[in-house]
Amino acid sequence: MESSDNDLKSPSIESQPTVPLFIERWLKKAESAVGAITILLGIAGFGVGLLFGNYVTGLVGAFITFGIVGALEVHHIQTKVRLLQRLKERNDRNALFNGIRKTRGSLPKIISEFEHDGVCFRSVGLEDVPLPLTMAGPLCPKCNGVLAQRSTVQFPGIIRITFLCRCGFAKPSSLTRAELIAEAEQIANLPK
Ligand SMILES: [Zn+2]
């Protein structure tokens, strides 16, 4: 039996490139543009197309898969970048508050406590300045613990944000911590 460089049972049409060559060329060109998932699913699409037809349906299957999954992957990456932007928090308000508090030698005073989007917030002022100046939260509605934020992007571009407490409380949210705090600041009438 004559053996070639590749042992794959490629289609017997001489003029067509063989499957491994095609995939190899594809891998080289596509690797920089899209991720491994797209390439692997593209190859799977080729296999499915080949299974239900011939080399041409294989190619069609591959390119359809490649196009759809490639677009989804680009969407996924764009969502990740957008989420990173949304996660950015302004920490200047608390720093400013602490600076004022130390300068005045005053103690913090809770001005209001309220629930927003299933989690708790406290607007905080000073004992001698009983006005909302800064915000504490998001806090756990069960034990008042500070909530941690977990955010992930599931393929293809589905954002999952969850607030978690050490007591076991967990709350899925459509908003990031920064966005929730911004809304709570508006509710509590904090100076901008
Ligand atoms: Zn808790």
Image: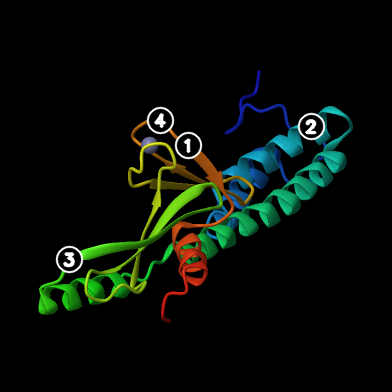
Amino acid type of the residue that numbered disc 1 sits on in the rendered structure:
Ala
Residue 172 drawn at (x, y percent): 55, 43
Quarter of the image where the N terminus is located: top right
Q: Nearer the viewer, residue 24 or 76?
A: 76
N-terminal of the pair, mark 2 or mark 1, is 2
Numbered disc 2: secondary structure:
helix
Label 4 residue near ligand 1, CB within 8 Å: yes
N-terminal of the pair, mark 2 or mark 3, is 2
Residue 175 visible at all:
yes
Q: Which residue is mark 3?
A: 107
Q: On the rendered structure, is 133 left or right of 32?
A: left
Q: Which residue is mark 2?
A: 48
Amino acid type of the residue that numbered disc 3 sits on in the rendered structure:
Leu
Q: Nearer the viewer, mark 3 or mark 4?
A: 3
Q: Quadrant of residue 53?
A: top right
Q: On the rendered structure, is 64 left or right of 185?
A: right
Numbered disc 4: secondary structure:
loop
Q: On the rendered structure, is 18 left or right of 32?
A: right
Amino acid type of the residue that numbered disc 4 sits on in the rendered structure:
Gly
Quarter of the image where the C terminus is located: bottom left
Ligand 1, by image quadrant, is top left
Residue drawn at 57 percent across, 33 percent down = 5
Label 3 residue near ligand 1, CB within 8 Å: no
Q: Nearer the viewer, mark 2 or mark 3?
A: 3
Q: Which residue is mark 4?
A: 168
How many residues crowd mark 4 within 10 Å: few (<14), some (14–19), many (20+)? few
Residue 116 drawn at (x, y percent): 53, 54
Q: Nearer the viewer, mark 2 or mark 1?
A: 1
Q: Nearer the viewer, residue 110 or 10?
A: 110
